[in-house]
Image (cartoon, rainbow, N blue to C red):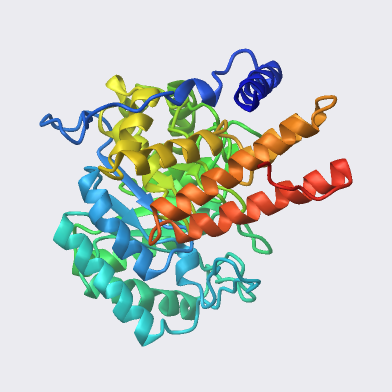
Amino acid sequence: MKRNLFVLFIVILLINTQSILPQNRTSSIDNIPEFLPQKKDSFIEEEKKPSGFSVRGIKGWSWTPEQYLEEIPVLAKYKMNFLMNCYISMFSQPLVANTNIKWNNEWWLPIPPAKKKAYEKVFEECRKYGITFCFSLNPQLASPRPLNLKSNKDFENIWEKYRWAQNNGVRWFCVSLDDVSGVKISGKLQSNFTNRLLARLRKKDPGAQMIFCPTYYYGDGTSAKQKPYLEQIAKYLDPSVYVFWTGPKVIPTQITVEDAETFRSIVKHKVILWDNFPVNDLGVTIHLEPVSGRAKDLYKVIDGYMSNPLFSENEINRIPLFTIADYTYDPQDYNPKESIGQAIIHQTGNKAQQQVLLKMVQLFSSKIEESTFNAIINHFTKITDIPYSRYFADLYISYLEKVQRELNNKFPKKYNATKIMFAKTIKTVENDYRNKYGAAFTMLR
């Protein structure tokens, strides 16, 4: 009887979900398989050369050096070739998971010796695995004293950080001036600063490469605010510099060739997509669906693709990252539904563990739109909006707790950050249950 009721609940929930989705967009549920493939049969097992983006990589998200070291072998396994440090990781006080510590960017302070040593190991491991490392700073974000682009003293101070990275074998660099506030936004000043830094780097290494992240890094570039700024970038920025772009929105559901062509025609530089997927800015959720909505021909217009990953959950980030690697390696043959199935079975050879991961993917899949969107909480809200829904709410919470136990039991030493976030999500759902029904949830027996 309980099984029949649970099936009925799922049917009602799916109907309710589909009714509010835009009719011209595929639901994320359509990209999640009901059954996993029986064997590994993906781009990883194929011998053919990559036919997509020349730059295929990831950045951290306030990651620690230890997180970078954990992911470098994964990038190599996934046939990716690029890793950029999160500039927040270089702040004097980066964001720390599960704490109330506020970030702070005292960019003028020397990098502590212990941090230097840790990142020098990251540089070394990237070389070992054939991964290009890109060193990035943002000296104008979340800083009590944003860098003055006209100041020689500030330039020499920030140069010391880039010089240190170059002296340790780094050949790719990034100047990020996105999301800044309290400073004058001038495409000419930003370009001149970046050009000066690149010229200094190329004195030692003529092959040094630079990426610039503009303040207006999203949109097609045609708005009244963005276009004059981007036209200055086009005019003054060294022609060899790549420009980051997140697509038509900060977190777009779709990125078309037309979007990229329009932006590139205005900025007049080589473009690398900085895709804000599967990023979870505040660590209140995870996004485990496959990457989708990115045009199959996008690689013909732009040169690279870099993913913005999950925050503290770098281990489970390997599931959506697999689909990103698959898409960027061979966009023409990419199939999100097939890719996510392969992503799951590539995490482990244990069938029971694979089934737990499939359940996690099913629970934490949603449309690519908002970094803080929690699919479980959203689904629970839909349940409680249905009349006489308490029993369905009971079933849903029971199922969440069942999956939680399976995750803990099948992976006793893995996915610790995910377990913490999942527990917080369940607690939020149980609090919502109490607020809705005026009683505490008691697990069904």
Of residue 361 and residue 442, the one placed in the foreground of this image is 442
- For the N terminus, the image quarter is top right
Across and down, in percent, residue 143 comes to 61, 72
Which residue lies at the image location 36% right of the left edge and 37% below the top edge? 324
Q: From what the image shows, is residue 96 above or below residue 47? A: below
Across and down, in percent, residue 142 comes to 62, 67
Q: Residue extending furthest left? A: 47
Across and down, in percent, residue 326 comes to 30, 33
Q: Residue extending furthest right? A: 438
Which residue lies at the image location 30% right of the left edge and 68% below the top edge? 200
Q: Is residue 100 left or right of residue 420?
A: right
Q: From what the image shows, is residue 337 above or below residue 78? A: above
Q: From what the image shows, is residue 266 above or below residue 386? A: below
Of residue 150 and residue 243, the one placed in the foreground of this image is 243
Which residue lies at the image location 27% right of the left edge and 68% below the top edge? 122
Q: Residue extending furthest top? A: 23
Of residue 394 and residue 207, the one placed in the foreground of this image is 394
- For the C terminus, the image quarter is top right
Q: Name the quadrant containing residue 38.
A: top left
Visible in this render: residue 444? yes
Q: From what the image shows, is residue 71 above or below residue 122? A: above
Across and down, in percent, residue 19 comes to 70, 16
